[in-house]
Image: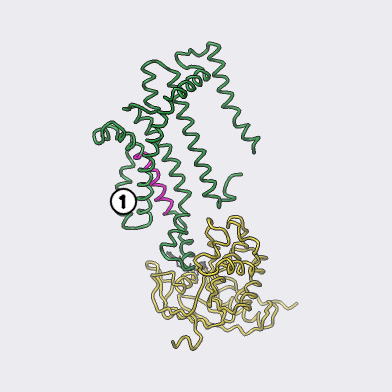
Amino acid sequence: MTARRWRRALTPVAVLLAWEAASRGGLIPPAKLPAPSTVLETGWRLARSGDLGEHLGDSLTRAALGLAIGGALGVLLGTVAGLIRLGDDLVDPPVQMARMLPHLALVPLVIVWVGIDESLKVTLVALGAFFPLYLNTYAGIRDVDERLVEAARTCGLSTLARVRHVVLPGSLPSLLLGLRLAIAAAWLSLVVGEQVAAQSGIGFMMMEAREFSQIDVVVLGLFVYGLLGLASDLILRAVERRALAWRVGLKAS
Amino acid sequence: MAGRAEGELIAGFDVRRAFGASVVLSGVDIMIRRGEVVALLGGSGSGKSTLLRALAGLDPDATGTITRHGRSAVVFQEHRLLPWKRVAANVGLGLTGDVPRRVAAALAEVGLADRERAWPAELSGGQAQRVAFARALVREPDLLLLDEPFGALDALTRLRMQGLFGRLRAEHGFSALFVTHDVDEALLLSDRILLLDGGVIAEDIAVDLDHPRTPDHSGFGVLRRRLLARLGVPVLEEIAP
Ligand SMILES: Nc1ncnc2c1ncn2[C@@H]1O[C@H](COP(=O)(O)OP(=O)(O)OP(=O)(O)O)[C@@H](O)[C@H]1O
Ligand SMILES: [Mg+2]
């Protein structure tokens, strides 16, 4: 198991080494793409000055706020539409229509509505997170095995208890998949939002650096995005391992 | 109540159910008395499961009068355990009071005392079905409703489960209505056999054989041939050895 994990780290490390060597050997012009060591050095410098931390903090705040708002709405409406027929009839049609639009196409409209400050970024993240969570919560609830609900009824469980013990746990795998997609959408929205108009954040840092041809800072921004994606993935995996421990044997060994 | 005096646990009168234009139950009259084990036989698609669901109160679209006395519990053809709850939590689902002790006792009775903390996905088919039995038994039912409870099991496990059923019944004295495809199983376990055909109970046959029963019991073959013929299965005259 651990041997396998190390083996999987081989190629990424090799790519980094090859890149470093190519930069030092003059194969890659530093004005187009700086060496990884240069990027790390820049990262260290910006981290020590506090700039990097500030940008990162602003980006994370926006992502968390947008995810919380859009995600909570998505789960709530998805649950209402999944559980209650009236909710389904009222909520689902407009959401299904709206999801056909790529939410980033709404940027000009959102700017008109909420301006270009913090609320723009948060709104975009919330929009990005809403749809995957709504859709997967809804589908998860709909796909719960009717026969299990019936069995719970014969055990004397009330409607509310059936929702709690059968429907919600049964839809959890789907909800977690929705969360995974929502987080990916949140990062994407943030990249766009912060490059359109911002005074801080990783996206802003990259745009500003490009204007001053600080290509190392631009690449640093990419590294940070990559690490953020990796970190959220690891956290999600840990959550899934705990919450879905009952799926023993269904997991690939 | 009049029914109670006669020891009647469940009675269905003129039970009807149709799916669209196809009528599955067209006026079933059925009654199970206290202490009695009744087998419900019928061809595939004859409406056995539909009738059982109606009797269990799970089908709001079935019409007719159904009266129940006492507690009932259901065991389905598939175990229907909740995959996200451990075995003990499945057995104790919806119970109140001294749940851990009752759950442990019920699991011990089906021979799974040591699997309390297992997930359903970790059990074999036979074990899962035994847990489903424990989940029904722990409710101390007066009447067990069983829909082909051994249908999904291999032949050997099936024989063991039939034995377990006989022991549990002797111990707890519950009544049962169990659906089966298997004429031999019906003859081994039941006091009375009902045959569902054409949407009504077409036959009501008492099985007056001593316990414990074996297929080489003298009266067994006669009843067996009669039931199989009634189910439309051609039976060859058995050749004496
Ligand atoms: N939900 C449903 N919708 C439509 N038709 C149904 C439904 N449930 C059952 N039926 C029909 O009712 C008839 C009886 O079904 P039922 O499941 O009660 O049969 P059964 O006697 O239990 O058969 P088997 O022995 O194969 O389990 C079948 O023709 C079936 O197609
Ligand atoms: Mg059936």
Q: How many marks?
A: 1
Frontmost residue, B179 versus A232: A232
Q: Position of residue B152 (x, y in %)?
A: 59, 63
Frontmost residue, B27 versus B98: B98
Q: Position of residue A28 (x, y in %)?
A: 50, 14
The three-letter code of the residue at mark 1 reads Val
Q: Position of residue B129 (x, y in %)?
A: 59, 64
- Identity of the residue furthest to the right in this view: B241
When asked about the image quadrant of residue B170, the answer is bottom right
- Magenta region's main secondary structure? helix
Residue B40 visible in the picture: no
Please tell me which residue is depicted at 49% across the width and 67% down the height of the picture. Answer: A155
Specify the color scheme. Answer: by chain
In this image, A112 relative to B59: left or right?
left
Residue A111 painted magenta: no
Residue A54 visible in the picture: yes
Which region is colored magenta? Answer: A126-141
In this image, A56 relative to B136: left or right?
left
Quadrant location of the N terminus of chain A in the rendered image = top right
Chain A tint in image: green
Q: Which residue is mark 1?
A: A91
Which chain does the yellow colour mark? Answer: B
Please tell me which residue is depicted at 43% across the width and 39% down the height of the picture. Answer: A183
Vertical side of B241 occupied by A148: above or below: above
Q: Position of residue A210 (x, y in %)?
A: 38, 19
Within 10 angstroms of label 1, few (less than 14), some, or many (20 or more) residues? some
